Image (cartoon, rainbow, N blue to C red):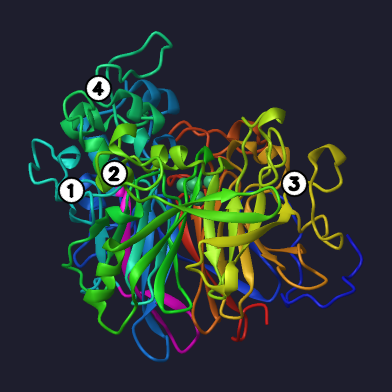
Amino acid sequence: HAAAPTAQSRYAFGELDWGIDETHHVAAGYDAHILLRWGDPVTAGAPEFDVMNQSAEAQLQQFGYNNDYIGFLPLNAEGTRGLLCVNHEYTNEEVMFPGLGRQDKAGFAGMTRELADIEMAAHGGSVVEIARGTDGKWTVVRGSRLNRRISPLNTVMAVSGPAAGHSRLQTSADPSGREIIGTLNNCAGGMTPWGTWLMAEENFHGYFWSDETGTDGEPDASGHPEAPKLRRYGAPGNWYAWGKYHDRFDIRKEPNEVNRFGWVVEVDPLDPFSTPVKHTALGRFAHEGAEATLSADGRLVIYMGDDARFEYLYKYVSNGSVSQDRAANSRLLSDGTLYAARFGPEGTLLWLPLVHGQGPLTAGNGFAGQADVLIDARLAADALGATPMDRPEDVSPRGDGTAFVMLTNNSKRTPGQTDAANPRPGSDFGHIIEIKEDGGDHAATRASWSILVQCGNPAIAAVGAQWNPETSENGWFGSPDNCAFDAEGRLWVATDQGRKWDRTGKSDGLYGLETEGALRGHSKLFFRCPAGAELCGPYFTPDNETLFLAVQHPGTDGTRNLQGFERDSTFEDPATRWPDFNPAMPPRPSVVVVTRQGGGKIAV
Ligand code: FEO
Ligand code: CA
Ligand code: CA
Ligand code: CA
């Protein structure tokens, strides 16, 4: 262990030891309880979870799979009641359905319409009322009238902004181009200043399907009227068999459906009957998250990563200011400017507007209007010369013109492709960039930037890691993904190493990462996941007494590298049975609630 830091850490907790095993761990003096598990009843009258006899109808009333973003909306002044807004990003069939292995899914041999519909019902989101008892413990308010499930199977959504109703969004089921069924691959997200929930649609390309195979053996889109654009977005990915049973996910049968995903969706959790809205002004790409803040003059600013190798960082700035009028506030999401970031070599940053008619964004270059600029946001940012990044994931703005960008990794960057903002070739561990907007104003079109940390093991010179030298062997991490500020203005970072976890030997976890002063770049481990899980969520309540964490896909990533966990004939080779540890139950993605033993603020 490293010597005690000479400067005072702003994170007052005893650092957890690093490691990896079958369960979760939190720093001493804290409790970490399971609040919600895949399959828990959510809506009034929802059936109990029966994993051996799951149905789409039951799943539509129960907590979905792979909890990712978590938002919390207090319902009373004391903050003892509130709504959790949780994204359900994707599904892991190999540990959901007894007897269905990875190969069955890849080849679709074991799939059925019923299983596909269960998958769809397990995607989307959940709104769940929770309450804190006098003993300080949070519990689910089962059957609350505010509890709601959102899914790609049956939740009707509206469309706002310049691409609403555009011919490229029209389908045979929806000639208006303004009514979309559902949302999918909702990864990170955000809560707006007026208490609505933003669900970011990330890897939508994986859900589109073609039964044609190209000469390279990959799913083929050459017959599609927008084939080059589809390729730029990676569609069809053929990750799921939904297109076999639902024509809209078959790109040959319904060529425009793919243009109706890849957006940011706004949900009003206070009205369980409200229609979610896909806001096209925020652009179409693999949205990791959508964290909102305010400009110096009160306009809405949203930072968004496009999580794919060599994709861009974006922000959206509304034209009007946030007010007390919730309906008017939502309209700010359809009237504003989308920008992509160009990182200069001298630590300067230019925000490039994605505005039709400006610069190269003209009809002559394939952009007939603003709708095309937004539907093809990646192509527009290409034309503007934005900087291709090492997979931009979550971005946390602090409200003072500062924002932190998680760049998770990029194994494909060659030595010839490095630049100042993405300095490492074949980056397995990623880095974090700090942006300081000019004048401390989040709406500025110029900024400066610096690298806060380069991730990975600082003891291995070839890794090229850069941390505050007082960071201990427990504190360094790889592959930053989600991040959050707490009420004390401190940054927390959650990791997602995926199948590369064995390159660090560490489980994924949550770290307090210093951003200021002598300890800038110093990281401390607070929580770690069970094997095969990544950590999502982190969300602190406004009183800083509760931390919500989303443990995603426990028991799956990199299981072949794990020793000492027994294979089971019912569910494919899970690395752990967390959190139930019941041989009749597979591992379940779950929301964990962290509180301080005896009460009080976290890490203060
Ligand atoms: Fe869904 Fe970029 O993680
Ligand atoms: Ca994820
Ligand atoms: Ca993520
Ligand atoms: Ca990730």
Q: Closer to the observer: label 4 or label 3? A: 4
User: Which residue position is annotated with label 2?
Assistant: 261
Query: Residue 502, image x and y in percent?
Result: 69, 38
Residue range in magenta is 122-141
Q: Give the labeled residue for mark 4.
A: 224
The quarter of the displayed image where residue 269 is located: bottom left
**Residue 203 in view of the camera:** yes
Disc 1: which residue: 180
Q: Mark 2 near ligand 1 (CB under 8 Å)? A: no
Cα gap from disc 2 to disc 1, whole angstroms:
9 Å
Q: What residue type is labelled 4?
A: His
Alpha carbon separation for disc pair 2 and 3 = 34 Å
x then y, percent, for residue 405: 58, 56
Of labels 1 and 3, earlier in sequence is: 1
State which tag comes first along the sequence, 1 or 4: 1
Look at the image and tell me whether residue 268 can be seen.
no
Read off the residue under disc 3: 456
3D distance between C-alphas at marks 4 and 2:
17 Å
Q: Which mark is residue 246?
A: none
Is 138 magenta? The answer is yes
N-terminal of the pair, mark 2 or mark 1, is 1
Residue 252 in magenta stretch = no
Label 1 close to label 3 by CB (< 8 Å): no
Amino acid on which the number 3 mark rests in the picture: Gly
Q: How crowded is mark 1: few (under 14 residues within 10 Å), some or many (20 or more)?
A: many
